Image (cartoon, helix red, strand yellow):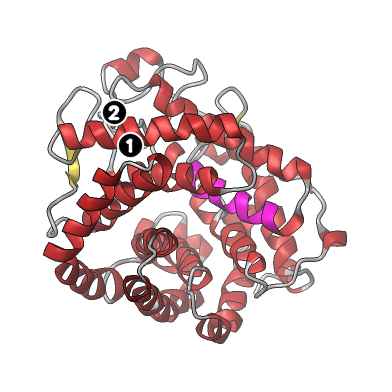
Amino acid sequence: MIAENKLVSIQTIAQRNQSMMRWNFFQPETGLYYMYADAYEPGRINLPTPEEIAACIPCSNGFSTPLENQNYASSQYLDTLLCRYRVTRKPEHAEEARRLFHGLRHLYRVSRSDSFVPRGVLPDRVSHYPDVSIDHISFWLMAMWRYYRSEVSTHDERRDLRDVFARFAADAEKHGWTFRREDGLITFWAKLDDPEVPRAPLVFMFLLLAAYDCTGERHFFDCYRAILEKDGRAILRRLESEAISAEVSWVSSQSIWLLDCLSQLEDDLAIKEVYRLNMIKIARNAPAQLEPYRDFDWRRACVDFDHRSLSHRNCLFALICVAFCPDAGVARGMMALCEQVIRHYDYRRDGKIIDLLDAVPRYYWIMASRGLLAYDPDADVEEDGAQT
């Protein structure tokens, strides 16, 4: 356990991580967070040029560039900031969430397709890679819907988002319920109505219910119920066999967020309970994903990506699965282990990509918003986030 972490609260560790995120990964021109920085030096971001992006260098997804997971990271963090505002009620926290929302909303404005959202954008606010993944699309959609339902959103923002969801869902349906690259090619794992594609049916059902919730168009709800009647049992069986027992926690954390959104959107108590029970099953698998934290060796992690992923990144994402567990008793039973995991790492030394920082604030603010972790207003202070 890091000596410094033994002396402070989980709230303080979460807030320090947030400061490091702003210091090292935030891009003011876009209002979004990068995945990682060049040479892991504070303030240094090694971006591709517009010409490299136009030529799809290094690839159409921008892998190994800071744009790779800009959408993914920022969308999760928006939900975290909304949870924080529910706890603190501070106007400046509402404003920080609103700024991030507008950065994410801008990604849709630069898209040339109504059902495409890029992974990220350069500070010129235009240049972006033409490919994306179902993970990015689903995280962006969930972030937009969470913001739509939040106390932070304004009347004009909600009206705008109703149009966004109507256009997005209509375009996806026009293309046979597929997510496509901006150039029209079908992206990886993006056929939403195929129950054999991992997580795609959950994304599909969420898109339909969120579109119905925002627009009131009954057609989207009818499509959702048709999926449940035809493939519902197969979808949940696949979720149990893959996302719960075998998948790494960064995948399970996506599945449990999708199920949480579906549960909030669903009015049928029997169906809501099915979603709830599957969330609990995912959460109960978290200890197996948390325990490898004991094996983490920061010297080995510098050169062994698999070791770092299994004993660091995956452990931190398992925190999110606990935070979303709808059974407070089950969540409380894992809190001591979660605290050991959180206190184990040296985030100033090891937080070289945003994935190694943002899971702790996400865990803390979700748990605090549920009343499962204490919030101390006197300890809610900003700190210097520079890595040392």
**Residue at 59% across, 63% down:** 366
Number of numbered labels in the structure image = 2
The kind of secondary structure element at disc 2 is loop
**How far separated are the C-alphas under marks 1 and 2?**
7 Å
Q: Is residue 83 magenta?
A: yes
Disc assigned to residue 63: 1
Q: Hey, which quadrant is residue 201 in on the image?
A: bottom left
Mark 1 in CB contact with mark 2 (< 8 angstroms): yes
Q: Label 2 sits on what residue type?
A: Pro
Instruction: Mark 2: give few (<14), some (14-19) or many (20+) Cα within 10 Å.
Output: few
Drawn side of residue 150 relative to residue 51, left or right: right
| x then y, percent, for residue 221 | 28, 51
Tag 2 residue: 58
**Outermost residue toward the right in this view:** 378
Q: Nearer the viewer, residue 328 or 124?
A: 328
Kind of element beneath mark 1:
loop
Is the magenta region chiefly helix, strand or loop?
Answer: helix
Residue range (magenta): 74-86
* Identity of the residue drawn at 36% across and 30% down: 118
Quarter of the image with the N terminus is bottom right
Q: Position of residue 194 (x, y in %)?
A: 12, 53
Q: 191 or 213, which is in the foreground?
A: 213
In the displayed structure, 192 sits above or below 128; it is: below
Q: Position of residue 79 (x, y in %)?
A: 54, 50
Residue at image point 82% right, 52% down: 381
Foreground pick, 306 / 282: 282
| Left or right: 380 in relation to 183 | right
User: What's the residue at 22%, 36% (across, down)?
Assistant: 172
Residue 388 in view = no
Note whether 1 is above or below 349 in the view shown.
Answer: below
Kind of residue at badge 1: Phe
Q: Is residue 299 visible?
A: yes
